Amino acid sequence: MLRKILIANRGEIAVRVIRACAEMGIRSAAVFAEADRHSLHVKKADEAYSLGGDPLAGYLNVHNIVNLALTTGCDAIHPGYGFLSENPELALACTRRGLTFIGPTAAVIERMGDKTQARLAMQKAGVPVTPGSAGNLANLDEALRVADQIGYPVMLKATSGGGGRGIRRCDDAKALRNNFERVISEATKAFGRAEVFLEKCIVNPRHIEVQVLGDHHGNVVHLFERDCSIQRRNQKLIEIAPSPQIDEAERQYIGGLAVLAARSVNYTNAGTVEFLQDTDGRFYFMEMNTRIQVEHTITETITGVDLVEEQIRIAAGLPLRFKQHEIGRRGFAMQFRINAEDPKNNFLPSFGRISRYYAPGGPGVRTDTCIYTGYTIPPHYDSMLAKVIVWALSWEDVLNRGSRTLRDLGLFGIKTTIPFYQEILRDPQFRSGHFNTGYLEAHPELLEYSEKRRKDHVAAALAAAIAAHAGL
Ligand code: ADP
Ligand code: ADP
Ligand code: MG
């Protein structure tokens, strides 16, 4: 087994990996930019090393991170999500220098990280793929020609895109002309690569993705699906496992497709195969994420499998501990991404000091976060500061538990997406369990909540806190 893991990440996912290490008797080494010196991941790790003053450069420097792992006596690196997690250079450098990379091989990361290559690999394997261009587009003329063939609306996408960025819907040739250079420049800025391709736009699809695990002994299993259709601007906000809107036959079908997809590229470690389901119920492969995902938590909750522990065991060369038929699931889990944003102000980031934080509790509740009372959120990073996960036996119960838990949570000093989620949880359509990726855009009234309800709750929480203090 591995002895000491360097976690090349920050925030809640670094804390998540540290927790897995602690349970497995593995030492954890955190890294941090100076802007993150007070982050919980630095406090919780067995050791922590500064990456210097630049808020981002240190987390992205492959050479430096690999050297640090070696000089501090680590035998493995866990990349988390974002940052270097899908950069084949890190996986390659680890292999070359005798370190274990906790993820798939560099070759697989490279192949699946390139969305056009991934599409080709899937077509070859017999996995249905969204209709689109055969490869990257050479120029606007080719884009216009392909769009005519597949029919509008089309999605113009950055080949190396991620995090919901570098994607534009084009309803006609004019929109495609307008967006072509824009997406290229966005892709170049965000991902350092200019390639783009076209896909047929599936109108009002559901985003359904399947968690897979593959070991180094030829075993590949899936751990059911997650419904990530609740999105804003192609970014996930609420995730649900299992999907309340597919049946058992569909579940088995996409589970099988995901295993086929993973097998066809000799996939190892944890990965996610993302599908879109159209309004006729057909599934299309969209992309594969070759890393642990933000929403892995809900799969853990319904299956009882610790996915980060499995990642570490697989990387250490151990065979999977369970066969497909041994993986069960129970009830529903729902994850809320608590973002430091003001929904009522166009989701403007709301960084600052957290004056009070009380974690929610009670049955069926999990929080993954790096915040605490008095913590100041640095402005350089993603606005997601906590994940709240709830579980219950039935769909209706998980909705009610979600509402109760978000009320239970106390988070003061900044604006967050919490009141917006409370509105969604009250909405009859959401509660009906039928929604697609267009849901939030179709319901602008969900933003018309009054802060008053929230304020009453704040006043009550403060009064309770004062009373508790006086009683001491
Ligand atoms: P998930 O699919 O796990 O929900 P997201 O798409 O929300 O993941 O991305 C997780 C994190 O990784 C976000 O902070 C996102 O900005 C970042 N990210 C994902 N893909 C890339 C990429 N290709 N380049 C840079 N950052 C990325
Ligand atoms: P990323 O790498 O940023 O996660 P994806 O390719 O997974 O990008 O797409 C992100 C989201 O964009 C999807 O969940 C979906 O909502 C939307 N999307 C992507 N491709 C299509 C498509 N062809 N038709 C409709 N929606 C799409
Ligand atoms: Mg995606």
Image (cartoon, rainbow, N blue to C red):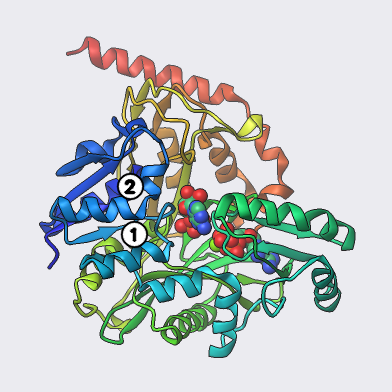
Between marks 2 and 1, how big is the CA–CA gap?
9 Å
Q: Residue at x 48, y 41 (%)?
A: 382
The residue that mark 2 highlights is 366
The residue that mark 1 highlights is 301
Horizontally, residue 395 falls left or right of residue 100, namely: right
Q: Nearer the viewer, residue 324 or 102?
A: 102
Where residue 426 appears, as percent x and y from the top left, is 58, 43
Horizontally, residue 273 falls left or right of residue 12, namely: right
User: Where does ligand 2 appear, by image quarter?
Assistant: bottom right
Q: Earlier in the sequence, mark 2 or mark 1?
A: 1
State the SS at label 2.
strand
Where residue 325 appears, as percent x and y from the top left, is 32, 83
Q: Nearer the viewer, residue 407 or 286?
A: 286
Horizontally, residue 283 falls left or right of residue 414, namely: right
State the SS at label 1.
helix
Where residue 99 appears, as percent x and y from the top left, is 22, 65
Q: Residue at x 37, y 46 (%)?
A: 59
Task: Verify CB contact (< 8 Å) between mark 2 and mark 1.
Answer: yes
Q: Is residue 436 visible?
A: no
411 to 469, vertically: above or below: below
Q: Nearer the viewer, residue 457 or 222?
A: 222
Neighbour class for label 1 at 10 Å: few (<14), some, many (≥20)? many
Q: Amino acid at mark 1?
A: Thr
Horizontally, residue 418 falls left or right of residue 34, namely: right
Q: Quadrant of residue 150?
A: bottom right
Q: Amino acid at mark 2?
A: Arg
Quadrant containing the C terminus in the rendered view: top left
